[in-house]
Image: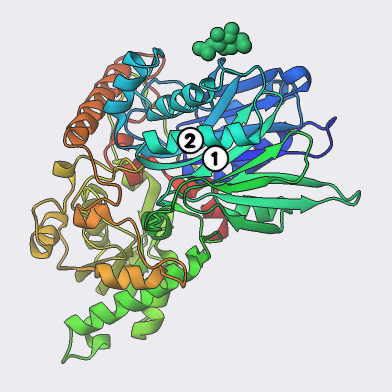
Amino acid sequence: MCGILGIVLADQSANVAPELFEGAMYLQHRGQDAAGIVTCGSRGRLYQCKGNGMARDIFNEQRMANLIGNMGLTHLRYPTAGSSAGSEAQPFYVNSPYGISLSHNGNLVNSLDLRKYLDETVHRHINTDSDSELLINIFASELERFNKSRVNNADLFSALEGTMKHVRGAYACVAMLAGYGIIGFRDPNGIRPLLYGERKLANGKSDYMIASESVVLKAHGFDNFRDVNPGEAVIILKDGSKPEFKQLVEPKIFAPDIFEYVYFSRPDSVLDGVSVYHSRIEMGNKLAAKVANFFTDKKITDEIDVVIPVPDTARTSALQCAVSLNIPYREGFVKNRYIGRTFIMPNQQERRSSVRRKLNAMESEFKGRTVLLVDDSIVRGTTSKEIVQMAREAGAKKVYFASCAPPIRFNHIYGIDLADTKALVGFNRDEEEIAKVIGADEVFYQDLQDLIDCCKSDTIKQFEVGVFTGNYITGVEDNYLQELEKIRAQNQRIRDAKKGLSVDACIDASDMVDVKAEVDISIYNRGDYA
Ligand SMILES: *[C@@H]1O[C@H](CO)[C@@H](O)[C@H](O)[C@H]1NC(C)=O
C-alpha cells in the first residue's frame, strides 16, 4: 500500500513542490518506507528527490529548493512485496518515450507474465522486483507503438487502454509526461482508492490534484472532488486547461479493498463515497452485537467490566462498542508517541519488545477487572499475544479480545504485505485455537457479512475480501503466491543481513515481526487526534 499524489498548478511560474511535500504529510500513514517527489519545470526538465524513510526527513529545505516547476508527483512507499528492502524509491522514471514518471499504489498479480513479455517481446530491461517498474514499462511500450514525435490525449488514452489489457491486479496511479501533463488512472475493479479534485482560483483558472485519500484534497482547498471510477483515466494538461476524463475499459465488479476501511485509511477520509470514520463506528456496533450474542442469557454488565481499545485505529470502533453494550470505555494503554524506529547499538540486548516500548498498560484500568480489548484486526497474533499478556500483568481478571475484522486466513495480494499465509495466526486455526495462541479467554471476530454491511453504499455493494476468504477479485496466476513468498523471504534475508552492518543497524529488528508493529501508522499523523 502506498500514498500517491499529483498536482498541476495553473500558474506556470509557481513551484508545486511545497504542496507536494505538504500533501505527503497527509498521506504519510500510507507508507513510511520511502518517499519521493518529482517535478517538471520549463522545457520539460524533470527534477526529483527520493530516499528511504519518512517524508519530513527526506525533503529538507535545501533539497526542496531544487524541485522546480508547476506540476509534479509524490509517492510514499509502504513495504509491499517486491518493493521493499533496497529497491528504488518511487516515482519511477523511464526516459523513452517522452520521459514518463509514475507513482503506483497497489500490486499486480500477473507480474511473471509481464516480466517475460517486457523482456522477450518489447525488449525492456527491468532492474528491480517491483511490479511498479513493470507497470511503467508496459505503459511506455504501449505509448511507443504510436511512433510519433508528439502524442495527444487520444494517444495517451489508448495507450492506457492497452496497459489495462496487459496488467492484472490492483493499481491506482498518477503518471507524468514531461512537458505535457499528469494522468490519473485506476484499475477496472477500483481496488485501490483514487480521487480527483479542482481548486478554483480568483482569476477564473483552476489548480488540479489527484490523490489517494480525500483528506489531502480537502486540506489543500480542493473542494470540488470526486473518485476516479474503476477503469477510468483523467488527463490534466500542464497549462491547467480543463481536464479530460475517459472510461477506458468496461468496469468490472467495483470492489474496493475493505482493509482501507478497517485499518489503512485515515478516519477523516471519505473513499468512494463512504466515510472511513462512520464505517468504523458501525464496526463497533456490529461487534457489540456479536459479543452480546455470545453472552445470550447473561447480563453483559456482569460479564465485562470495561472496554479498552488497542490504540489507535481501533479507538473509534471500541468506543462505539462500549456505548452499544452500555459498558464503560477506558484508555488502558497509553502510547509512547516518540518511539518510531529506535536505534539498537551494536551488541545491545533488546530488553523490551517493540509493543511494550510503544504501549504502556495503566494498572488502575485493568486491576481486578474483566476487560474486553478491541483491535482492528489480528494478523500474526504476536502483537495481540503481547497485549493480552500486558493486560494480565496489569491485573486483569479475564481478558476478552475482539477484532473489527474477521479472521485473516490468506495472503493480502493487493499491496498490504501482511505476512505469508502460514505466518498468520488465523491460518488453519479456528477461533478457539486462536484464543489459545494469543492467550485470551475468548476472541470475538466480526462476521464478514457484518463488516461488508458496515462499509457498503448505494454504489459499492462488494469489496475485495480475499484475506478472509482466499477468493481474490482479479484471480491469481497459479505460481504467483509462491513467487510472493519467495520475494518476502529474500527481503527478509536482506533485512537480516543489514542487521549485521553497523551503518544500517538502526532498524529495530523486532519491529519487523508484525506489520502493525513495523509500520506504526498512527504515531505521526493519527496520534495527534487522540
Ligand atoms: C517511425 O517513424 C519514423 C519517422 O516518422 C519512421 O522512419 C520509422 O520507419 C517508423 N518506425 C516504425 C517501426 O514504424
**In-image side of 265 versus 152 (left or right):** left
- 369 or 100: nearer the viewer: 100
Mark 2 sits on what residue?
A: 104
**Label disc, if present, on residue 390 of the rendered structure:** none
Whether pointer 1 and pointer 2 mark residues with C-beta atoms closer than 8 Å, the reply is yes
Residue positioned 70% across, 28% down in the render: 180
Q: Is residue 381 above or below residue 154?
A: below
Mark 1 residue element: strand
Q: Position of residue 511 (x, y in %)?
A: 33, 36
Residue positioned 56% across, 61% down in the render: 268
Mark 2 residue element: strand
- In the image, is the residue at mark 2 within 8 Å of ligand 1 by its beta carbon? no
Q: Amino acid at mark 2?
A: His
**Label disc, if present, on residue 4 of the rendered structure:** 1
**In-image side of 37 versus 293 (left or right):** right
**In-image side of 452 versus 335 (left or right):** left
- In the image, is the residue at mark 1 within 8 Å of ligand 1 by its beta carbon? no
Q: Position of residue 102 (x, y in %)?
A: 54, 29
Distance Cα–Cα, label 1 vs label 2: 7 Å
Residue positioned 24% across, 70% down in the render: 447
Ligand 1 in which quarter: top right
Q: Residues within 10 Å of mark 1 (few under 14, many from 20)?
A: many
Q: Quadrant of residue 345?
A: top left
